[in-house]
Amino acid sequence: MNMRERVWILGVPLAPLTAEEALATVAEWLRAERGRTRLIFTPNAEIIARAQVDPELRAALAGADLTVPDGIGVVWASRFLGTPVPERVPGIELLEAVLGLAARQGYRVFFLGGRPGVAEEAAARLSARWPGLQVTGTHHGYFGPDEEEKVLENIRAAAPDILVVALGAPKQELWLTRHKEELTVRVALGVGGSLDVLAGRVKRAPQLFRRLGLEWLYRILRQPERWRRAVFLPRFVLAVLAEALARKRGRE
Ligand code: UDP
């Protein structure tokens, strides 16, 4: 992602791309020679608010090759601050599009994350949907620091083109950034709870909620333990308002 093309929201860069353009960018990286690993993250308002108080997370997001706005709050903020991104690009939709591409073009995929069994279930369901899909490895996301080397070795042995990391945010962003140099994959995506959805364990919000930009509310209602994380939402709004004020003063 070219620096000049990025939009900055509270110190976090975002690519001003439609979902289709984001997929085209990933497709290009997959076609390119195997070189360095490109990191793709999908921050929402909660993550951007967390990044305000977590310098390592902020650096991880700033160092990514592609970041797309997963949440409606981020799209709102980008418009409010006068540097709009075209649309919301839900992480799960980008992931599904990338997996569809992988199935058509024969790219190898590795799933890392979720409770034991989830990655395998997701792989089985997706292979039924796209018989050409090659999931060449899976590993659950509950490993300790002493198992890290083994997990990295598993990934290298499976030689995937695409690494899907579902450790939840901000764990996946930090993990991928720390281990980027030890990975020999073309692209790695941090996808939060998407493997749970693809495995059929968690349902996505109905279309009505999605259309109204209320997918986040649906998730809180279905998983009430998420309320604790919602404290980041008012913080996000306040930080955006403060930033808008600062930018206005800067212009005067
Ligand atoms: N997870 C994991 N290892 C951990 C913590 C979480 O693999 O140490 C998984 C968890 O099983 C779930 C996902 O990470 O599949 C986090 O889901 P969530 O919906 O909370 O994603 P977020 O909204 O944080 O991106």
Image: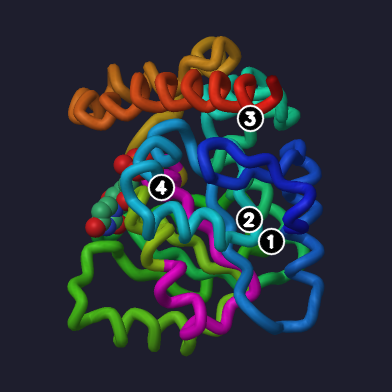
Are the residues tagged 2 and 1 within 8 Å (C-beta)? yes
Tag nearer the camera, 2 or 1: 2
Q: Along the horizontal axis of the image, is 149 left or right of 212?
A: left
**CB at mark 4 closer than 8 A to ligand 1?**
yes
Type of residue at label 2?
Leu
Q: Is residue 127 visible?
A: no
Q: Identify the residue under disc 2.
A: 99
Q: Identify the residue under disc 1.
A: 103
Tag nearer the camera, 4 or 1: 4
Which is nearer the N-term, disc 4 or disc 1?
Answer: 1
Q: CA distance from mark 2 to mark 1?
A: 6 Å
Quarter placement of the N terminus = bottom right
Residue shown at 59% from the left, 77% from the top: 185
Type of residue at label 3?
Arg
Secondary-structure class at tag 2: helix
Residue shown at 55% from the left, 29% from the top: 74
Tag nearer the camera, 2 or 4: 4
Residue shown at 47% from the left, 60% from the top: 60
Which is nearer the N-term, disc 1 or disc 3?
Answer: 3
Which is nearer the N-term, disc 4 or disc 3?
Answer: 3
Q: CA distance from mark 4 to mark 3?
A: 16 Å
Q: Identify the residue under disc 3.
A: 88
